[in-house]
Image (cartoon, grey):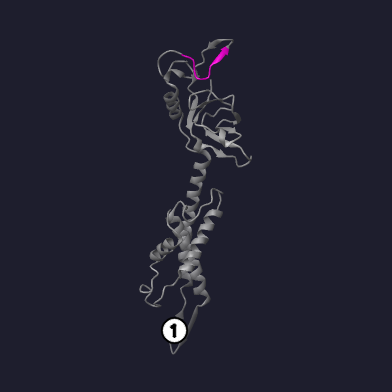
């Protein structure tokens, strides 16, 4: 959302049709710009304080104009309803009954309606963002196999059961070979593999350890401790030179001790 506060206040006013000419009984706007702005800030604070605790947003970075509008309307009708109920007066004279400021229940009803819509959309959106930030996109095994084959070549991939080459060709050495002395022992990587490429923009400062930068690779191999291969942008194996902090059945964390050491490359988790 790219609206500044004055623009968003006018959007709320237009949605409510809160203009002097439209308010025929009173002839004035019901809410001032300051009162609407206060309700915008309350709705924004409510979004940021609602679990799950994801990245804090401002008015300009809020992910949904419609959601913030619903939150603002909730606060606006609650505030106006309080004023209506405080000034409510009923009197009668000579058989004529007059009710003044009697719209409190209607305003609270509107606030409840907008609040229900707002809460449902807010929770759904925040959960979606939280899942996306925490786990990325979990691809199928077939998708990972396709990307692994495309990156390393079909000759590097065999089925995990029969050993038949999926990509055709010869069983040439895989990207993670073994050596006996000076003799290369061919190792063909199984189909249980996941691979991704990363750039320097994908590294993040550690939230727990100062001066540490890390890259988190989420995979879906489902094995306790897969093997890991890390290549730089020139396809050099840099696995042993990196501090691989954590390897699990669904992600790998690699870390460096300075922002100067981050690099472009690729990371592969696999099972032989």
Q: Is residue 223 above or below residue 100?
A: above
Mark 1: few/some/many CA within 10 Å (<14, 14-19, 20+): few
- In terms of secondary structure, what is the magenta stretch mainly? loop
Residue 254 screen position, x and y as percent = 57, 32
Q: Is residue 177 magenta?
A: yes
Q: Is residue 108 visible?
A: no
64 or 160, nearer to the observer = 64
Residue in the image at 43% along x and 29% along y: 143
Residue in the image at 47% along x and 49% along y: 125
Residue lying furthest bottom in this view? 94
Residue identified by numbered label 1: 97
The magenta stretch is 172-179
Residue in the image at 46% along x and 63% along y: 73
244 or 79, nearer to the observer = 244
**Label 1 element class:** strand
Q: Is residue 138 magenta?
A: no
Residue 115 screen position, x and y as percent = 48, 60
């Amino acid at each position: 959302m790219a609206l500044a506060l004055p623009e968003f206040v006018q959007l709320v006013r237009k949605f409510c049709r809160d203009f002097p000419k439209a308010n025929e009984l009173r002839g004035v706007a019901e809410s001032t710009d300051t009162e609407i702005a206060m309700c915008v800030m309350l709705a924004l604070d409510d979004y940021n304080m609602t679990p799950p605790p994801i990245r804090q947003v401002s008015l300009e970075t809020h992910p949904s104009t419609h959601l913030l509008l619903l939150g603002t309307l909730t606060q606006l009708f609650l505030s106006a309803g309080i004023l209506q109920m405080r000034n409510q007066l009923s009197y009668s004279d000579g058989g004529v009954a007059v009710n003044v400021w009697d719209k409190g229940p209607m305003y609270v009803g509107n606030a409840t309606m907008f609040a229900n819509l707002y809460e449902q959309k807010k929770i759904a959106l925040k959960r979606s963002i939280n899942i996306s930030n925490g786990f990325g996109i979990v691809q199928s095994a077939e998708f990972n196999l396709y990307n692994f084959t495309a990156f390393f070549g079909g000759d590097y991939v065999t089925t995990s059961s029969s050993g038949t080459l999926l990509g055709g060709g010869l069983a040439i050495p895989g990207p993670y070979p073994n050596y006996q002395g000076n003799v290369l022992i061919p190792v063909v990587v199984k189909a249980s593999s996941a691979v991704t490429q990363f750039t320097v923009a994908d590294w993040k400062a550690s939230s727990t350890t100062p001066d540490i930068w890390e890259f988190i690779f989420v995979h879906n191999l489902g094995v306790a401790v897969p093997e890991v291969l890390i290549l730089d942008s020139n396809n050099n194996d840099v696995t042993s030179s990196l501090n691989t902090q954590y390897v699990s059945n669904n992600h790998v964390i690699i870390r460096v001790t300075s922002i100067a050491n981050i690099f472009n490359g690729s990371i592969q988790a696999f099972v032989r």
